[in-house]
Image: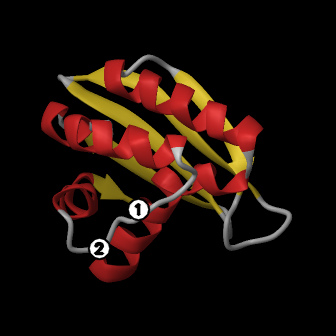
Amino acid sequence: MNKFLLTLSVSATLLSPTYAGNEVDAGALKYLDNLKTCTPFTFNYPHPFVPGFTAQNIIKGKLAGNCRVTFVMPGDKKLNCQFTPETVKLLTSEAIYEEARQNRYSGSTSDPASKRMSEECKM
C-alpha cells in the first residue's frame, strides 16, 4: 500500500469512530483514554466507509517503550503499529479529545500525527 493511502487509512481508522453516534462517541473517548496510557483495550465500531463492517482498534500494551496497536480493517487487513510515546501524545492531544466530544474529525494526511503514523505502522 503506498504511503498516502496508508496514512489516510490510519488517520480515518483511528478517529472515525466518532462519526457513528453517542454510544460510539463514549467508546471513542474511552479508546483515547486507554491509548494515552497504552492500557490493553479493544474498541469495536461500524466502519465509516464500508457499511456492515465492524472495525476494531486493539491496544495490545507496551513493547520496548512503544504502544502496540492493531487496526482491523476491511478486506482481512490488519495494520500493526508501534507508536512511540511522542506519537501517542499527538494522537491523544486535547484537540483530538475535543474533536471526539464534538463528533467530528478534521485531520489531514500532512499533519504531524499522520506522518508519524505512516512511519510507525505496517500492514
Residue at the far front in the pictured view: 102
Distance in Å between CA atoms under marks 1 and 2? 7 Å
Residue at the far right in the pictured view: 52
Q: Nearer the viewer, residue 9 or 89?
A: 89
Badge 2: how crowded within 10 Å, few (<14), some, or many (20+)? many
Q: Is mark 1 on a helix, strand or loop?
A: helix
Contact, mark 1 vs mark 2 (Cβ under 8 Å): yes
Inspect the image, locate mark 2, and give the three-letter code of the amino acid beneath it: Thr
The picture places residue 42, in percent across and down from the top left corner, at: 61, 30
Tell me if 33 is positioned left or right of 94 in this view.
right
Q: Which mark is residue 2?
A: none
Q: Quadrant of the N terminus?
A: bottom left
The picture places residue 7, in percent across and down from the top left corner, at: 34, 69
Name above or below for residue 60 compared with residue 80. above
Q: In which quarter of the image is the C terminus?
A: bottom left
Q: Which of 30 and 10 is in front in this view?
A: 30
Name above or below for residue 69 compared with residue 73. above
Q: Which residue is drawn at 31% across and 81% down?
A: 4
Q: Which residue is drawn at 22% across and 43% down?
A: 90
Q: What element carries label 2?
A: loop
Mark 1 lies on residue: 11
Q: Residue at x 21, y 35 (%)?
A: 89
Badge 1: how crowded within 10 Å, few (<14), some, or many (20+)? many
Inspect the image, locate mark 1, and give the three-letter code of the amino acid beneath it: Ser
Mark 2 lies on residue: 109
